[in-house]
Image: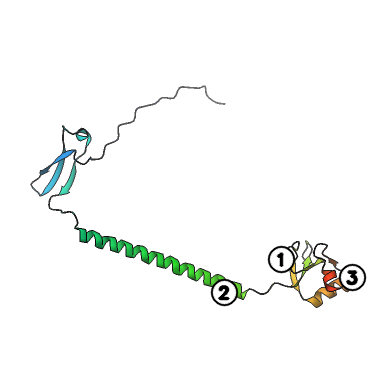
Amino acid sequence: MRPAHRPVRTRRLPALPHLPVKGAGRMEEEADGLAVTKPRRDHPAGLFTCRTIERMNDRPPSRLEMLRFAERVAAQHLAQIRRWREAEERRQAERAEGERRRPPAPDWLLEKGVDGRAPTYVHDGSCWSARKGPRCVGITREQALRALSVDRITPCPQCRPDAVLGVLE
């Protein structure tokens, strides 16, 4: 049983702290060589900035250092792309080897019943209605002739292997 409907109480969430805004503070040097950014009251975002610490002696990287860094990153990307290409080449070679090793499709199929023992149909190897799987077994032309003529197994009504083999009743 559901309780009676009560209004949901809500509460106000605390405000999220704001990230420092560039130009919102002025740099002051401390005794240990660190620069401390203090909020400025004349900047619109100055009241909401937090204190950040930066090294006074740090200089921005030179153009040459940035180009060397970009070169290292590009080399890493190129190495990764080469590894991907090599893996794809290996996959394609394995796929081609599997296709090469696959045995040829049988010319004739013998379909077994649901119990897996008694044969039910003889099919042409390219018959679309043959259930490819454990119930169908590949057989030779002689075995197909024997199954149709001697064992009297029913030919498939779609692919008509009896007409192809010349076994007409």
Q: Compare residues 39 and 119 and report the one nearer the observer.
A: 39
Q: Is residue 103 above or below residue 13?
A: below
Q: Alpha-carbon distance for marks 3 and 1?
A: 29 Å
At which x and y percent is residue 133? Answer: 70, 65
Q: Earlier in the sequence, mark 3 or mark 1?
A: 1
Foreground mark, 3 or 2, reads 3
The amino acid marked with disc number 2 is: Glu
Mark 1 = which residue? Answer: 134
Classify residue 85 by image quadrant: bottom left
At which x and y percent is residue 44? Answer: 21, 32
- Residue at (60%, 75%) from the top-left corner? 100
- Residue at (89%, 70%) from the top-left corner? 168
At which x and y percent is residue 112? Answer: 78, 66
Classify residue 123 by image quadrant: bottom right
Q: Earlier in the sequence, mark 1 or mark 2?
A: 2
Q: Compare residues 2 and 71 and report the one nearer the observer.
A: 71
- Residue at (21%, 58%) from the top-left corner? 63
Mark 3 = which residue? Answer: 168
Q: Which mark is residue 149?
A: none
- Residue at (84%, 66%) from the top-left corner? 155
Q: Alpha-carbon distance for marks 1 and 2?
A: 24 Å
Q: How many residues crowd mark 2 within 10 Å: few (<14), some (14–19), many (20+)?
A: few
Mark 2 = which residue? Answer: 97
